[in-house]
Image (cartoon, coloured by chain):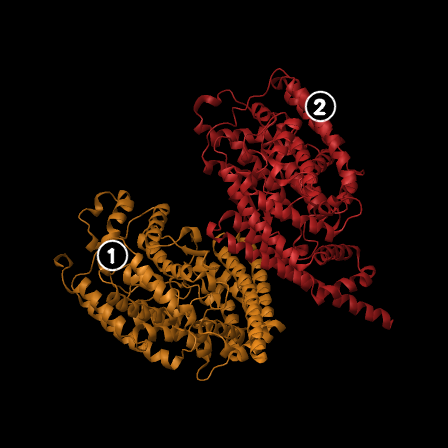
Chain colours: A orange, B red
């Protein structure tokens, strides 16, 4: 009896200390997230150098926090106390231990160098992209790769060095499982691409390619976000060079987008993408927000949310039927009579037009994965030292030609288009394709469980969808891991099947028979 | 010889450690400054509660940093090593020791409670101000006052409790010196006010009271900032409820302003005010920026910069002569023919019109100090417990009537108008009046040292003025203290004389004789 009481007190103390510790860690990390957001949106250009140093300092403090006596003691106690905790708390402790291992694996100096190198790489990437000159970015990328190789060794891996980086975004996933799955996907989408390219008639995209003022594009995006369920009291939408979403907690979720003045779909679908991320972040339960479980379960699950909204829902016929009148009302006045005779079906065709293109974020659902396949191959080659940094532009362009049949004419629309490598995010790209596979599985399940789903979407009623996602993913997900979550939802392992089925059906609708007759 | 070598190595090690320590401290503080700026500009409203907690955590980390073994060792060593350092480095060490004493004087819990109470007070003040309902703010102000009283006791004082707070902004200044000086100023400006009110003709202000779009007001402000020398590559201008300036280092200096759609001078002169602060911050030498000497020498010196630009230069006839064509070009189109016959002299009269008014930040140069006198009296009474928080609105209104002869009809334009108390900044207001006294001394000195000063201003050539301020104040000031700096520049102690002389001359120009004949 006396022993049990001691046990209870120990558990209580442990929990109190863990809460205090994690709250401090998460708060400091939120300030880092804010500084990162600011760097991309409102920071004056002259502040870049010092901001790099400020962020490096903050990373160092986070690292120090996780390497403190308090953290070490908590990690040691955690193993003893774990069996005494209810399942929900066990999950939180597991998340703490995962983070603890990640941080204590890397020496402070390496983390600091990584942070510094990333911020400088980011600035040089911005310049290089503007000038479309890879050589301005190359030395910084070179330095980052050296540091990432060091990071891999410190993180450790069982099969392949790349697993160490994959695990940062998709815990437990290995290249040996990832590579065949993505290869299968590559084969499937290349077949579909060939079929599409053989079709005699391609959908018109006149509804996208018009010059629409930036303000109007943002206005429409905001209206749609509100309608879908984005809480503007707990978030924002701003402009940046590369769209992203960052959260300082569920009460402060910030999306960015970019404007293409000649193609309103770029801004619109970028926002829908970030909106998917944002809804996930806003949906994380408040009581978990300052704990180590207050994050998305994995990046593939995060991407599943963005791709579900951007592509599966956002490019569905039902969604286009709801969107079309708004699109016409808001943008029509800038177009005159050129849109005469347009219809929701035409919009559906336009946003689902399949065509190999240079920019990943603007790619259609079929060719998108080929961009990812290219990046995965290049990352593996760069990290292994089989591809020299200076040869990247050529390798990129060759890969584009091999996979997509087109060749970029400048680095800006080639290997300089993505922000990820400048941020040191190697191992991240595959989560986009995985996210798509998960999204297709969620969609299939949602169709089963929500009667009248398409009618709801068609009527602009997004609450049923959002509620389903809150229940199924946002609220429970922080307490699971990615593979487990898929298993629980679909009752099976992750495969390419649901996606291939979904996209084949969609292509048949767009390309296979006259849409008007549907 | 051996001893000397050991001494050198000790000095070297000490210096290296101090640099690392202060860089970390300053970087973390910059992230706190960013979070504060964001809170006032772009933060979604729903994030207020968590932001309060995040800022409290950051303050706790700063406090912990300053209470660490490293800091304690540095502080102990500093006293031994000080005599071995050159003067410039001695000053930096003194600044460190001052900051060290401030932080170690307060227990961590109090700092945390202060930070949390301030952020909640800020949010309640915003709401209370919008609703013009002091009762929404009162409990939070009450709590803040309790904490400030505790802070005073921990900080310590020799003569008067208020000295502890004064010293946070104006090191070394005591109430026994401040109070008679401000009392003398009150008598002088009340006499001037009586004289002005007895004049038969008051200048017209038709050039200010017109409805000008917010964008145009901001555009003109930005043009003028650029012309004066604000480096837009190292700073920004945004909107907020209450104008302020914050710096994340000389490379990232952020001003805010507010728009009064019916009076373009509100935005314009708010910006000139913040510009004075911003130029000071941008002028702090890069090599000091991450040291404890990388800050303004005192708040009175900081305010002297804002008031010099806003009032002494910005409301001079020479400046109006330069500004008038711009003002007319930018704003004239919204006014039609109502400005016919207007002149630079009329603008000069309009921006120097003396008239008791309710809002401190919009007050003229004569009545401005009376607003400060009121706040000083109220702060002393609140802190001493002689005035109950709930009686503040009445005491405020009575004071306005006694000092300025007018009475606010609502709290919004009464005791809720300023952000300072919500931020816990008691003891700050007097620095505005002190700043004005210093500004007048600087102006007098500048007139002596810069031949053709008014012609330069009249021609929009602000470089000579800015260069003089850089040399005299911005670049050397971080290494002195406020009183010393005044002594060095003017060769005498701070008095009200230069200001009274300056303002009497200005009033004679505006009110004493027809301006046209000058």
In this view, the residue farthest toward the top is B200
The quadrant in which the C terminus of chain A is found is: bottom left
Residue matched to label 2:
B191
Q: CA distance from mark 2 to mark 1?
A: 74 Å
Pick whichever, B390 or A281, lies toward us: B390
Label at residue A302: none
Q: Is residue A319 left or right of residue B431?
A: left
Secondary structure category for the residue under label 1: helix
The residue depicted at 62 percent of the width and 51 percent of the height is: B250
Residue B212 placement (x, y as % from top left): 46, 32
Residue A371 placement (x, y as % from top left): 34, 69
Residue B475 placement (x, y as % from top left): 70, 48
From where the camera sits, is residue B405 visible? yes
The quadrant in which the N terminus of chain A is found is: bottom right
Q: Residues within 10 Å of mark 1 (few under 14, many from 20)?
A: some
On screen, residue B158 above or below A407: above
Q: Is residue A176 left or right of residue A57?
A: left
From where the camera sits, is residue A189 visible? no
Residue matched to label 1:
A456
Judging from the image, mark 2 belongs to the subunit labelled B
Q: Is residue B508 left or right of residue A103?
A: right
On screen, residue B459 above or below A440: above
Secondary structure category for the residue under label 2: helix
Q: Residues within 10 Å of mark 2 (few under 14, many from 20)?
A: few
Where residue B84 sits, quadrant-wise, is bottom right
Q: Is residue B466 left or right of residue A192?
A: right
Judging from the image, mark 1 belongs to the subunit labelled A
On screen, residue A114 above or below A314: below
Where residue B87 sits, quadrant-wise, is bottom right
Q: Nearer the viewer, mark 2 or mark 1?
A: 1
């Amino acid at each position: 009896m006396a022993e049990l009481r001691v046990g209870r007190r120990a558990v209580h103390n442990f929990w109190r200390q863990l809460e205090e510790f994690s709250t401090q860690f998460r708060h400091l990390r939120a300030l880092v997230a804010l500084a990162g957001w600011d760097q991309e949106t409102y920071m004056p250009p002259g502040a870049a150098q010092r901001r790099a140093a400020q962020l490096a300092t903050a990373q160092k403090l986070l690292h120090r926090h996780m390497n403190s006596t308090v953290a070490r003691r908590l990690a040691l106690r955690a193993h003893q106390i774990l069996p005494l905790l209810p399942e929900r708390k066990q999950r939180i402790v597991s998340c703490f231990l995962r983070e603890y291992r990640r941080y204590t694996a890397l020496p402070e100096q390496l983390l600091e160098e990584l942070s510094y190198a990333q911020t400088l790489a980011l600035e040089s990437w911005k310049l290089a992209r503007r000038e479309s000159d890879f050589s301005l970015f190359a030395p910084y990328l070179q330095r980052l790769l050296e540091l990432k190789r060091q990071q891999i060794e410190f993180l450790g891996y069982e099969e392949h060095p790349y697993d160490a980086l994959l695990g940062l975004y998709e815990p437990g996933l290995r290249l040996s499982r990832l590579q065949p799955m993505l290869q299968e996907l590559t084969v499937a989408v290349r077949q579909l691409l060939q079929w599409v390219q053989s079709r005699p008639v391609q959908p018109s995209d006149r509804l996208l390619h018009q010059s629409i003022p930036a303000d109007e594009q943002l206005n429409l995006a905001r209206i749609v976000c509100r309608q879908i369920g984005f809480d503007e009291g707990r978030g924002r939408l701003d402009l940046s060079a590369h769209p992203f979403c960052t959260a300082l907690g569920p009460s402060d979720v910030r999306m960015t987008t970019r404007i293409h003045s000649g193609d309103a779909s770029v801004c619109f679908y970028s926002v829908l993408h970030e909106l998917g991320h944002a809804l996930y972040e806003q949906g994380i339960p408040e009581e978990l927000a300052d704990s180590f479980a207050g994050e998305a379960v994995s990046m593939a699950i995060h991407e599943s949310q963005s791709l579900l909204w951007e592509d599966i829902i956002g490019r569905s016929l039902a969604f286009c039927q709801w969107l079309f009148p708004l699109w016409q009302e808001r943008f029509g006045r800038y177009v005159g009579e050129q849109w005469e005779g347009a219809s929701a079906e035409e919009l559906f065709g336009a946003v689902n037009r399949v065509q190999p293109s240079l920019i990943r974020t603007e790619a259609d659902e079929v060719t998108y994965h080929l961009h990812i396949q290219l990046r995965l191959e290049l990352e593996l080659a760069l990290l292994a030292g089989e591809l020299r940094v200076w040869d990247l532009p050529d390798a990129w362009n060759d890969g584009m030609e091999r996979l997509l049949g087109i060749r970029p004419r400048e680095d800006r629309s080639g290997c300089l288009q993505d922000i990820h490598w400048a941020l040191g995010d190697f191992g991240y790209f595959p989560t986009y394709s995985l996210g798509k596979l998960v999204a297709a599985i969620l969609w299939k399940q949602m169709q089963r469980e929500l009667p009248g789903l398409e009618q709801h979407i068609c009527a602009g009623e997004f609450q049923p969808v959002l509620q389903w996602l809150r229940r199924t993913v946002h609220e429970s997900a922080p307490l699971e891991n990615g593979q487990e979550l898929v298993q629980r939802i679909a009752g099976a392992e992750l495969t390419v099947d649901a996606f291939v089925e979904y996209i084949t059906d969609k292509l048949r609708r767009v390309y296979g028979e006259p849409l008007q007759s549907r």
